Image (spheres, rainbow, N blue to C red):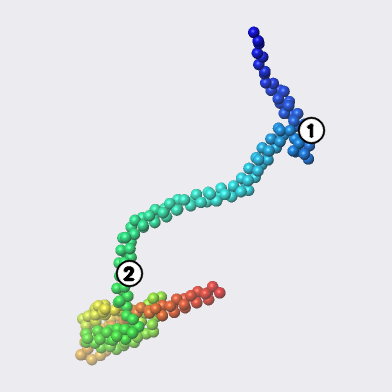
Amino acid sequence: MAKNSTAKFDLNAWFEEIQEQFRGLNPQEPGQWPLAPRLLTFFAAATVAVVAGWFLVLADAQASLDAEAAKEPALRQDFKTKLIQAVNLPELRKQKSQVEEYVNQLEKQLPGKAEMDALLSDINNAGVGRGLQFELFRPGAEVVRDYYAEKPIAIKVSGRYHDIGSFSADIANLSRIVTLNNLNVAAVTGRDQALTGTLTMEAMARTYRYLDAGEVAEQRKAKSGSKAGAKK
C-alpha cells in the first residue's frame, strides 16, 4: 500500500523569499526588479495618484456638488410655486384680463392733450351752472410724470353754501378725473348786506391726462439720459 505525503507550506521560507527580492535593488533599473518590489511600487504609486487626485481635482468637484445640493430646497420650492401657477394659469389669465380692462377704463377717464381745453371749460361751466361767481380760475404749468401729466388749476368761487357743495359734487361726477385739494371755505365779510350768507371757496383743482406714445418715449429717453449722467 502506497503512502501519500502531503506537502506543507513553509511560511517562514515564503517570507524569507519575499525579503530576498527586496535586497540589492537598483533604483536606476526598476524594470529589472523582481515581481514583489514591482507590485508594491505599483500599488504605492497608484495610492499616491488617487490621494493626489482627490485633493487636487475631486475636492473641488465635491465642493461644487455640495453647493448645488444646497440649492435643491430653493429649487424645489420654486418648482412648487410655478406648478401652482401653471395649475391656476386659466384663473390668472382671467384676472390679468380683468386688470387690463380696469386699467383701460381708468385711461378713458384721463383726457388726451386735445381734450384738456374742453375739460377746463367743463369745470368752468359746472361753477357757472350752479350760480357761482369765479373770482379766480388760473391753470398752472403741467407736471409730467412717467405715464401721465398733472394739470393744476387754482380756483376761487363765491356763492351760497349749497351751491358750492353742489359744484364740488359736479366736479366729482365729471366723466374725467378732477380732484379738489387744499379746500378753504370762508364766509364773505365786509361787503354789502345783500351778500349776507355768501361763502368763498378757494381750492387747487387737479386734472390729469395720459401721455401719447411720443411723449412717453421722450420721458423714457430723458430718464435714461439722466441715469447715464449720474453714473458718469
Label 1: state its secondary structure: loop
Instruction: Please tell me in which quadrant of the rendered image residue 191 appears.
Output: bottom left
User: In the rendered image, which residue does mark 1 sit on?
Assistant: 24
Q: Is residue 15 left or right of residue 76?
A: right
Q: Is residue 90 left or right of residue 225?
A: left
- At x 50% / y 74%, what residue is drawn? 227
- At x 33% / y 61%, what residue is drawn? 92
Q: Amino acid at mark 1?
A: Gly
User: In the rendered image, which residue does mark 2 sit on?
Assistant: 100
Quick one: quadrant of the N terminus? Answer: top right
Residue 192 in the image: above or below residue 179: below
Determine the CA span between mark 1 and mark 2. Answer: 93 Å
- At x 25% / y 78%, what residue is drawn? 173
Instruction: Please tell me in which quadrant of the rendered image residue 36 appears.
Output: top right
Residue 133 in the image: above or below residue 221: below
Instruction: Please tell me in which quadrant of the rendered image residue 130 appears.
Output: bottom left
Q: Which residue is outermost to the bottom?
A: 192
